[in-house]
Image (spheres, grey):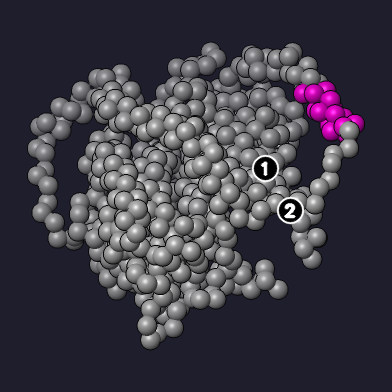
Amino acid sequence: MSEAFEIVAFIISAFIAIAGALGMTTTMSMFRSGIFLMASFIGVAGLFILLTADLIGVLQIMMYIGGFLVMIVFMVMVMHDPGGAMMAGMDMAFVERWFSKGLVPREPPHSGHSGDMHGAHGQEHRAHRRDSHPMPQGKAGDHRSHSVHHDEHAGDDHQSMQDMDNSGHAGHAAHHGNDKNGMDMGGMDMSMVTPVRPAAAWLAGAIGVVLVSMLLLRPTWRVVNAMPDPDSARRVGHLLMEKYMVAFEGAGFLILIGIFGAVLLARPSSHPDDPSRAARVAVAEKPEPIADDGLVPLPVPDKQTEHKEHHRSDGHGA
Amino acid sequence: MGVIATSATVLAALGVGAALTWALERLFLQPRGEPGPAHTADLGRNLDIANSDRWLLPAGPVVALAGVALAMVVVPFGPDLIGRDLGIGVFYVIVVIDFVVLGVALAGWGADTPDSVEACYRIIAQLIAYVVPLGLAYVGVIMMARSLSTVAIVEAQSGLWFVVLQPIGFVLYLVTGLMQSYRAPFLEPFAVSIGGGVLGASGGWSALLWRIALAGVLFLVAAICAVLYLGGPNGPLLPGWAWMVVKTYGLMALMLWLGRAVRPLSTARMLELSWKILIPLGLLNVLLVGGIILLGIGPSRP
C-alpha cells in the first residue's frame, strides 16, 4: 500500500514538475507561463515531501505561490502582451499549440493596413463591455446579454478561435485569408518563428542528455542506514538559532531595514495612465460602504469637483 | 484505511462548516449584507464568458477549494479528531491557504473581464498586505508552544489560553484573519463596485465551489484562531468537538461583527494599515512574548 502510494505520488509529482516546465517554455501566454512554472515548482515540492523533507517542500510552495503571483503582476505591468492574445494566432508547433489551447487570439489594436478601423472596433467593443457593468451584477442573464453583444461585435474573432480549435493552423490561416479585415499575420509569424528556435530546442535536448547520462554513469552512491529526522523543523530551527545565528539574524535585519525603506519610500500613485484604470482607481479610493452598517455616512463630494477630476484624468489619459 | 477516513473527516468538516457558515450569515447579517460567499451568483446556470481562458477560469474555484480542504487536515476538532498531526502543522496552514489567493488570481485573469482582472490584482495586493502580519501573529504562539504542531499548541494551552498571555497577538490575528477571509472591512477583491470580482464571472458549479471555498476560509481562519489563542478543544464539561465548534463559531460571529463596525478599507488603505501599523505591532508582540518567556511565565518547559 505505502510502497504503491509512494510510486504513484512520485509519478504524479514528477509529471507535474516536467509538464509544468515544458508548458512554461512553450505557452504563448506569459501569465500562463508563470502559472506553469509555479506548478513545476509545486511538483518539485511534492518530491521533497516524498523524501520526508516536508519543511523544505512547504517552504518551496510558500515562496513560489506568493512570490510568483507578485512576479506575474509585475510582468503584466511591464510586458506588451501578457495574456498571449496577439501571439495565440501564430504559427505554432504541436506542443506550443497544446499548451496554448484555449487562448483567444485577438488582433492588436493598431496593426496592418486597416489599423484605424481595428482601433475603432476595439474601442467600441470595450465601451460595450464597460456599459454592461453598472447593471445588477452576478446575474447569469446579464452576462448572457453581454456575450450576445460581444458576439455581434466580435463574431468573426470568436469564429476564428473556433476554427483554431477545430483544425489548427490551417483553418486559421484559411480564415484569415478570406477575412477582408484580416491583418497581415504573415509578418507576425515571421517575427516570432525565429530560425534560432530549433537550434535552441536541440541545445536544450543535448544538455538534458548530458545531465541524464552524468546521472546514469556516476560512481555508485554510498548507501547509509541513517533515517531522515521526521521532525526536521526542530533541527532546522536549532541550526538557525545556534550555529548560524549571526548570518540568520543579519539577513533578517537586512530584510527589516528593507521593509522600513519600502514603507518610507512608498507614495500613492497620482498618474493613472489609462482612463479606464483611472475610473477603477477612483473606485478603489472610495470603497463601497456596507449596506445598513449603522455608521455615519461619509460626506458626499459635490458633482462639480468630481466632474473636474474626471476631466483631468481624461486629459491625462489622452 | 487512514487516507479514506482522513478524506471523509476533512470533507465532512468542510461541508458542515460551509452549511453552518451560511446559516450564521443568514442569522446575523441583513439580507443585503456584504458579498462574502458567492451568494449573488446563480447556482442554477453555467456562464459562458466569451474570450475567457478555458483552462484558467475553471481551475480557479477548484484550486481555491483544494487549498481550504488541504488546510482543514491539521485542524484538531477534538482530542483524537484530526486529519493528520503534521510536525509543521501551523506553517502548513499558512502556506496552503495561499491556494485560495492563487485560485482567485487564476479565475480573475482567466475570465478576462475588466472587473475580474481588477479582482486578480486586488487579491494579490491583499496577499502582500496580510501575509507578513499574519505570520507574526503565528510566531508569538509558536514561541510559547515551542512547536509547530497544532496538537502540541493545544496541549501547551491546557493551563492558560494564549489569548491571556498575548492579547496583542490575538487582535493582530483577528484583523489579519479578516483580511485573509476577505470579509467586511477588507472585501475589496469581491466588492460590489467591481461586480463581485470573480464571483461575477461564476455560475453553476463554479459558483457553488466559490461559495464553499469562501465560507470555508472564514471557518478555517476562525478554527485556527481557536487553536492558536483559545485552547482549541480544551474546556470543561462539554466534549472537545463541542468546545471547538462553540469557539470557532463564536470567533466567526465576533469577526463578522467587528468587521461591520468599521468602515471598509480600500486596497491602498489596507496596505497602509498593514505595513505601517500591523507589522510594527507584530514585531512588538514578538518582543513582548520573548520577554514574557524569559520571565518564566507561560507553559512549563519540558
Q: Crowding near pointer 1: few (<14 within 10 Å), some, many (20+)?
A: many
Task: Look at the picture and state if A290 lies above or below A21.
Answer: below
- Which comes sooner in the sequence, label 2 or label 1? 1
Q: Which mark is residue A170?
A: none
Q: Nearer the viewer, residue A111 or A93?
A: A93
Q: How many numbered markers are drawn?
A: 2
In percent of the image, x 25 and y 35: which residue is there?
A282
Mark 2 → mark 1, Cα distance in angstroms = 21 Å
Q: Tell me the residue that label 2 is attached to.
A: A227
Asked whether residue B266 is in view, the answer is no
Residue that extends furthest to the bottom in the rendered view of this protein: B237
* Image position, residue A145 (x, y; %): 43, 48
* Image position, residue B151 (x, y; %): 50, 67
* Image position, residue B219 (x, y; %): 41, 65
Instruction: Identify the element where label 1 is drawn.
Output: helix
Q: Which mark is residue A44?
A: 1
Q: Nearer the viewer, residue A76 or A249?
A: A249
In percent of the image, x 57 and y 58: which residue is there?
B87
The majority secondary structure of the magenta stretch comes to helix
- Quarter of the figure that contains the C terminus of chain A: top left
Asked whether residue A253 is in view, the answer is yes
Asked if residue A216 lies in the magenta stretch, the reply is yes
- Please state the extent of the stretch shown in magenta in the rendering: A204-218
Q: Crowding near pointer 2: few (<14 within 10 Å), some, many (20+)?
A: few
Asked if the residues shown at circle 2 and circle 1 are in contact, with their CB atoms under 8 angstroms apart, the answer is no
Instruction: Identify the element where label 2 is drawn.
Output: loop
In percent of the image, x 81 and y 60: which residue is there?
A4
Asked if residue B198 lies in the magenta stretch, the reply is no
Left or right: residue B214 compared with residue A282 = right
What amino acid type should be assigned to the residue bearing mark 2? Met
Left or right: residue A24 compared with residue A132 = right
